[in-house]
């Protein structure tokens, strides 16, 4: 959580007690730095449902049976050659693709593809429909079908509709006009009943689609994860939110990670975290990706902000910068990649790997850093600060920078989790879900973590950029008191908070003051003035908010 | 339904009471009617769907109000006042359904968005073939009465909602109803009919008449997703039109 002159682009969440031991090594390290159509293995032909037969012939007997059927269909005109292409990889082989027809009309989705080696069929795959018994003469003409789709899609269509037999899930068939409509947001295939005129089926044919997967988080909790299908797999690219949100799996290659952070290399699509069936088990990637999205959601819903720069800059999360099993050989070089999380600027986040089971550091266990939603929100909020007040990362302005990240981290946690204690419960501890016991800081009781709860106790040395991680607790505690109320342990002054049910009032006040009113070299005193003014701006008719803010700052000794 | 039928039979028998009258001299009669089906046949449906790893659901309440119906038929007097005939009726109406959809949130588990909407233009067609035993009455002069009853074969075609399309945008906490996807389900079922046709002959062969008929069926439509949707078809309809006797 410091921005030092030696390390200008990195803001971290290192525990205060561990920070001093890690700092030098961390700074030094950073400075160095086809889809198979059908798969039916057991039989050459398998009737799967409702008149649909899959063909997957490979053995000699299977090929003989399937080829007989295909040959019969070819001779009767039910299968017609669509393409015949030479195999450019295996000499002598040809790939022939046939479409299924019924009374001269193509059956949508009915086709067979065979691989031929000098006249001998090598493989034969396909999908054919039988028991089709419908009138293949359209009543609705193609112009009417096109107009029907134009009305729905809101675009003019010049493309010629295609008359097809459309197999339905219930085993029936419909004679339909297939019409493709491309809009600004979609490319959709519509099927218009050629005898009735209604839309009987449609689907999006936009190839870069989003997908919703299921993932298991660091704490074993199930959640939805917004991913994208590609090449028969799913990757951590979120296409459902306005900004590009990508999560990369660095696969334990810390050298490559550092080279990327120093912009010496670019990451490719192949670096994205990947899963074969969209049921994700890489918990670090799941939580980094999901919580990045949730943090974006919080800022959008609570504050109307569109991402870190308020202009939907992309969010990049890096996970697995090292491997836990390499701890002993790597720790001296890149301790931060185990025991910290960072915001590196330009929307790039890195989450430490944590420690292997059985290992502790300063008496605490560390799980994947992305597993705490408040840590993710904390790091992303450094980006918000970078694109707004640009609070200088040293002394009081640096402490305010850290405090704003802690405050928003807690706010995001309360936004998505029920209040309480324990895993996945919202409280005023930072990182408590993955750093056990207790997390790294407390907004409610800073003294219990060795941090000042009053301006008179502030750290005045030069370590930690003038105590940015230490003195942040003064503003953190003011935020806490303004919501929950209570008595400051040092001053003994009481605060009448707005109450947890009204926490959004204090969140909005701090957000407004810290993103729109504070200058880069702000002081605690300026933060007090700005938040009081923000309370007046936002809640002119509600004195409770201004009173709570004023009392809170006074209680922590900031006047 | 039983009350309605009993009332209808009572009316028919009441009309038959003064049947001290003559039998018909004509063998064949034809009737063409425009009628109004008074019965509403509202029904409900519920289906589930998978979206974003969770199961969403849609409840749809369909309105099927009464409306205009066309009826045509004829009969043959076979022996004295006893005869047989057949009539065909067809009821077509576009109606609407209100929907309430619970759609999973793409980002969060167990956080559903509830979206209400109204789908219009859902077609209901009921085609019925009424096979009838007939009793012919000629109470006086130009007044003729035909009492009828027998089996009915009803075919229902109903547009069912198979998907509610929603418009949603970041942050996806709410969604808007956009449109529905429908499919037409058809099913036939035997039922029964009972009715009366009162004619006033203007000439020897041409007259006008009024008809009241009751036929009713409960049908389980086989909807997509292996679910069954129970609908009622038919009811009481009454109307009038042209009568021809031969």
Image: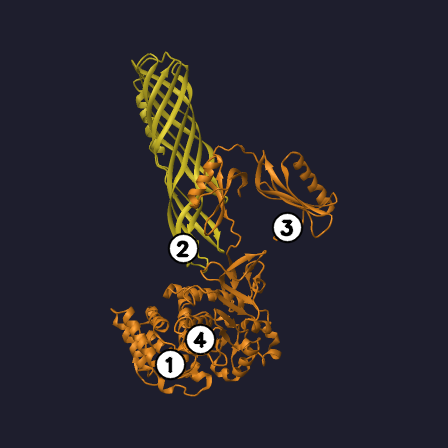
Asked whether the residues under marks 1 and 2 belong to the same chain, the reply is no
Q: Position of residue A413 (x, y in %)?
A: 42, 69
Q: CA distance from mark 1 to mark 4?
A: 15 Å
**Chain coloured orange:** A
Q: Position of residue A536 (x, y in %)?
A: 27, 72
Circles 4 and 2, Cβ within 8 Å, touching? The answer is no
Numbered label attached to residue B113: 2
Circles 3 and 2, Cβ within 8 Å, touching? The answer is no
Circles 1 and 2, Cβ within 8 Å, touching? The answer is no
Q: Which residue is most to the bottom?
A: A461
Q: Residue at x 48, y 34 (%)?
A: A141
**Chain coloured yellow:** B
Query: Badge 3: few (under 14), some or many (20 or more) residues near its Cα, within 10 Å?
Result: few
Asked whether the residues under marks 4 and 2 belong to the same chain, the reply is no
Q: CA distance from mark 1 to mark 2?
A: 41 Å
Q: Is residue A299 above or below residue B41?
A: below
Q: Residue at x 64, y 35 (%)?
A: A77
Circles 3 and 4, Cβ within 8 Å, touching? The answer is no
Judging by the rendered image, the residue that carries numbered circle 1 is A474
Q: CA distance from mark 3 to mark 2?
A: 37 Å
Judging by the rendered image, the residue that carries numbered circle 4 is A430
Q: Is residue A198 above or below residue A93?
A: above
Judging by the rendered image, the residue that carries numbered circle 3 is A39
């Amino acid at each position: 959580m410091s921005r030092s002159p030696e390390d200008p682009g990195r803001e971290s969440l290192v525990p205060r007690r561990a920070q001093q031991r890690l700092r030098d090594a961390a700074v030094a390290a950073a400075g160095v730095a086809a889809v198979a159509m059908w798969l039916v293995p057991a039989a050459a032909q398998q009737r799967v449902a409702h008149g649909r037969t899959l063909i997957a012939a490979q053995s000699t007997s299977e090929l003989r049976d399937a080829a007989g059927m295909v040959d019969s269909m070819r001779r009767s005109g039910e299968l017609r050659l669509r393409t015949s292409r030479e195999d450019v990889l295996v000499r002598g082989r040809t790939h022939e693709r046939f479409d299924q027809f019924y009374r001269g009309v193509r059956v949508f989705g009915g086709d067979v593809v065979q691989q031929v080696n000098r006249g001998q069929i090598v493989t034969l795959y396909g999908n054919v429909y039988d028991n089709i018994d419908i009138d293949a003469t359209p009543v609705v003409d193609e112009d009417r079908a096109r107009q029907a789709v134009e009305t729905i899609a809101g675009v003019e269509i010049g493309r010629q509709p295609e008359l097809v037999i459309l197999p339905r899930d219930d085993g029936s068939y419909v004679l339909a006009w297939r019409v493709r409509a491309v809009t600004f947001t979609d490319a959709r295939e519509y099927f218009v009943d050629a005898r009735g005129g209604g839309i009987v089926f449609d689907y999006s044919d936009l190839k870069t689609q989003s997908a919703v997967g299921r993932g298991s988080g660091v704490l074993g909790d199930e959640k939805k994860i917004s991913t994208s299908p590609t090449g028969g797999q799913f990757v951590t690219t979120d296409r459902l939110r306005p900004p590009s949100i990508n999560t990369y799996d660095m696969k334990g290659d810390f050298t490559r990670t550092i080279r990327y952070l120093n912009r010496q290399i670019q990451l490719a699509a192949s670096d994205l975290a990947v899963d074969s069936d969209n049921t994700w088990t890489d918990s670090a990637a799941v939580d980094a990706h999901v919580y990045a999205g949730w943090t974006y959601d919080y800022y959008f819903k609570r504050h109307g902000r569109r991402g870190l720069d308020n202009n939907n800059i992309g969010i990049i999360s890096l996970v697995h910068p090292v491997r836990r099993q390499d701890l002993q050989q790597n720790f001296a070089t890149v301790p931060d990649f185990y025991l910290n999380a960072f915001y590196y600027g330009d929307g790039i986040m890195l989450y430490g790997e944590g420690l292997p089971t059985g290992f502790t550091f300063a008496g605490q266990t560390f799980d994947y850093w992305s597993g705490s939603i408040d840590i993710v929100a904390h790091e992303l909020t450094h980006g918000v600060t970078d694109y707004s007040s640009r609070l200088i990362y040293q002394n009081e302005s640096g402490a305010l920078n850290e405090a704003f990240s802690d405050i928003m981290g807690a706010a995001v946690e309360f936004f998505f989790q029920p209040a309480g204690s324990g895993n996945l419960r919202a409280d005023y501890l930072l990182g408590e879900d993955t750093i056990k016991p207790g997390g790294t800081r407390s907004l409610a009781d800073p003294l219990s973590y060795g941090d000042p709860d009053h301006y008179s106790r502030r750290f005045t040395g030069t370590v930690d950029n003038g105590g940015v991680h230490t003195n942040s607790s003064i503003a953190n505690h003011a935020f806490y008191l303004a919501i929950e109320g209570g008595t400051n342990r040092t001053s003994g002054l009481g605060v009448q908070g707005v109450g947890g049910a009204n926490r959004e009032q204090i969140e909005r006040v701090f957000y407004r003051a810290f993103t729109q009113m504070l200058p880069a070299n702000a002081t605690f005193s300026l933060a007090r003035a700005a938040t009081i003014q923000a309370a007046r701006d936002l809640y002119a008719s509600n004195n409770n908010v201004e009173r709570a803010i004023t009392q809170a700052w006074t209680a922590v000794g900031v006047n | 339904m039983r009350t309605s039928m009993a009332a209808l039979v009572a009316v028919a028998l009441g009309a038959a009471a003064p049947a001290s009258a003559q039998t018909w001299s004509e063998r064949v009669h034809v009737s063409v009617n425009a009628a109004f089906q008074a019965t509403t046949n509202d029904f409900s449906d519920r289906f589930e769907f998978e979206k974003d790893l969770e199961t969403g659901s849609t409840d749809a309440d369909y309105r099927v109000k009464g409306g205009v119906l066309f009826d045509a038929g004829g009969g043959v007097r076979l022996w004295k006042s006893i005869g047989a005939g057949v009539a065909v009726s067809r009821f077509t109406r576009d109606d609407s359904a209100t929907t309430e959809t619970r759609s999973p949130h793409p980002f969060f588990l167990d956080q559903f968005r509830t979206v209400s909407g109204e789908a219009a233009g859902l077609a209901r067609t009921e085609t019925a073939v009424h096979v009838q035993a007939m009793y012919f009455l000629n109470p006086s002069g130009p007044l003729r009465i035909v009492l009828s009853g027998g089996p009915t074969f009803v075919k229902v075609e109903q547009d069912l909602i198979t998907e509610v399309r929603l418009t949603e945008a970041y942050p996806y906490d709410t969604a808007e109803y956009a449109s529905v996807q429908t499919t037409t389900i058809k099913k036939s079922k035997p039922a029964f009919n009972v009715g009366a046709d009162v004619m006033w002959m203007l000439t020897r062969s041409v007259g006008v008449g009024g008809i009241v008929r009751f036929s009713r069926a409960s049908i389980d439509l086989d909807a997509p997703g292996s679910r069954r949707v129970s609908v009622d078809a038919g009811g009481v309809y009454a109307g009038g039109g042209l009568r021809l006797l031969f």
